[in-house]
């Protein structure tokens, strides 16, 4: 079982901790505005929120759009695409107006609203997507 620990570097104090499951984590990315983290790796994507001294995790919901596989990287980007009006965080909306992108071992990029898969960009790369970086209104 793997554990994610949020540590306040200035004081050396542990702020929160939570379980991320039995498979290795390959990428962790913090939300730019919210107390939320995406953790992904071999066969999983999890969205974790800070709740007191605990990290509460929820698994990603793939629906019929994508499949569980190895996720190699993640990034948050400001949601600025047709049909999105900047709703506040909710169970199905974009937390803080951001979406999460994850890269896959087979070269795809998945776009998440909250913990729900909303778009798959197939063959974004010839080989694994090992790094993502988003700046400004990208999506």
Image (cartoon, helix red, strand yellow):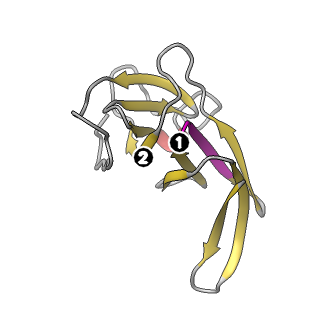
Is 85 situated left or right of 35 in this image? left
Q: Which residue is mark 1?
A: 42
Left or right: 9, with 118 as reference point:
right
Instruction: Give the residue at x 60% y 32%.
Output: 60
| Residue name at image x 55 percent, y 36 percent | 43
Verify CB contact (< 8 Å) between mark 2 and mark 1. no
| Majority secondary structure in the magenta region | strand
Who's the residue at 52% across and 45% down the image? 40
Whether 126 is drawn above or below 132: the answer is above
Image spot of residue 105 (x, y percent): 38, 37
Q: Secondary structure at mark 1?
A: loop
Q: Which mark is residue 74?
A: 2
Q: Which label's residue is closer to the chain start, 2 or 1?
A: 1
Q: CA distance from mark 2 to mark 1?
A: 13 Å
Pair 2/1: label in front: 1
Badge 1: residue crowd in 10 Å (few <14, some 14–19, many ≥20) = some
Q: Quadrant of residue 16?
A: bottom right
Q: Which residues are magenta?
A: 42-49
Classify the position of the C terminus by image quarter.
top left
**Residue at disc 2, secondary structure:** strand
Left or right placement of residue 18 versus residue 72 in this view: right
Residue 47 sits inside the magenta stretch: yes
């Amino acid at each position: 079982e793997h554990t994610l620990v949020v540590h306040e570097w200035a004081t050396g104090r542990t702020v929160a901790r939570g379980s991320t499951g039995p498979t290795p984590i390959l990428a962790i990315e913090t939300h730019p505005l919210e107390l939320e983290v995406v953790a992904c790796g071999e066969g999983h994507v999890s969205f974790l929120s800070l709740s007191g001294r605990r990290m509460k995790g929820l698994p990603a919901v793939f629906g019929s759009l994508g499949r569980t596989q190895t996720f190699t990287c993640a990034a948050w980007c400001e949601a600025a695409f047709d049909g999105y009006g900047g709703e506040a965080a909710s169970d199905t909306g974009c937390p803080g107006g951001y979406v999460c992108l994850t890269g896959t071992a087979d070269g795809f990029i998945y776009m998440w609203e909250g913990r729900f898969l909303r778009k798959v960009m197939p063959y974004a790369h010839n080989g694994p997507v090992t790094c993502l970086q988003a700046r400004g209104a990208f999506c």
